[in-house]
Amino acid sequence: MASIPYQEIVSSDSFKFLVGSEKKPYFLHSALVADQSRALNALVNSGMRESKERCAVWEHIDEQTFLRFSQFAYTGDYTGAAPSEDKVERRNLSSARILPIPDPKVYGNVRTSSIWTNFVLLFPDTGLHLRRNGATDDYSEVFLSHARMYFFAEYYAIAKLQSLALQKLHRALVLFTPYRERIGDILKLIRYCYEDRALRESESHIDVKFIVSMYTAVRIEDLWQSEEFQSIVETIGDYSKGLVHAMLMRLAPV
């Protein structure tokens, strides 16, 4: 939500963004863009070429992420992606029994239960309502939409949006039923967050990598059945380090 008067927003000129590989044009009120962060204020008002031309080329930003940023700029909130149906998995499960990964809360392990409780309580309930997923519900884009929003906000130093995206990702993971058939959804999130990404040092010890590491530490017994997950642990050192740190929390005295 903007911190400047509404009249100032609607009376400001338009700033053009050419978004994605196709450079699709979008227009936002310049005062609203500038109000989001110092970085975007510089984009709009610095007097450099983009500022003078009132146009920025954002080929590195996908269209849906930009639209969510726009929604946040005007309303203070954004809508993440919805789950899709995994039709291939549905065919595979037509005669198969669906076996959900056991919930840590009833896992019979006090330490596992404790770290899950700690994970759930990292953030207050945001009021994000998602229906309970089935084994054929693909949640890859649900998770990735929030992760992309987080990294977008991190890049442009939009603190409120970064915090919101982190809370939405956290809540989506809390509500997610991790069926064995849906382990791949989690693996896509891990790869996106860790591969070829060097985050700036966060002022908070709770960032997107911490969230992903802590969540997967709870699910480690089941994730380890996946050869792809084992490959991730072997090849992505930054993730492995975070995972070990999170797993040590399970070994701490309760």
Image (spheres, helix red, strand yellow):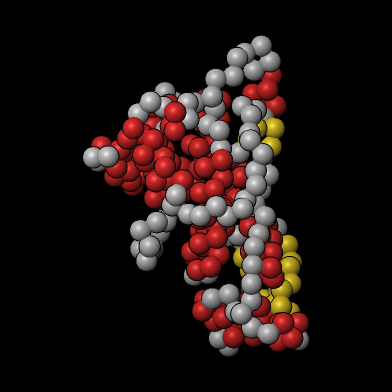
Q: Residue 192 placed where, x, y %?
A: 49, 46
Up/down of 43 relative to 69, above or below: below
Up/down of 134 relative to 152, above or below: above
Q: Residue 166 placed where, x, y %?
A: 51, 55
Is residue 49 something that shows in the picture?
Answer: no
Residue at point 51% right, 79% down? 38
In the image, taking residue 73 as reference, residue 229 lies left or right, namely left
In the image, taking residue 195 as reference, residue 5 lies left or right, namely right
Outermost residue toward the left? 253
Residue at point 35% right, 29% down? 109
Residue at point 47% right, 26% down? 102
Up/down of 90 relative to 119, above or below: above
Quarter of image, res 82:
top right
Is residue 221 something that shows in the picture?
Answer: yes
In the image, taking residue 9 as reference, residue 212 lies left or right, namely left
Quarter of image, res 113:
top left
Outermost residue toward the top? 95
Q: Residue 252 placed where, x, y %?
A: 24, 41
Residue at point 39% right, 50% down? 210
Number of numbered discs visible in the structure rendering: 0
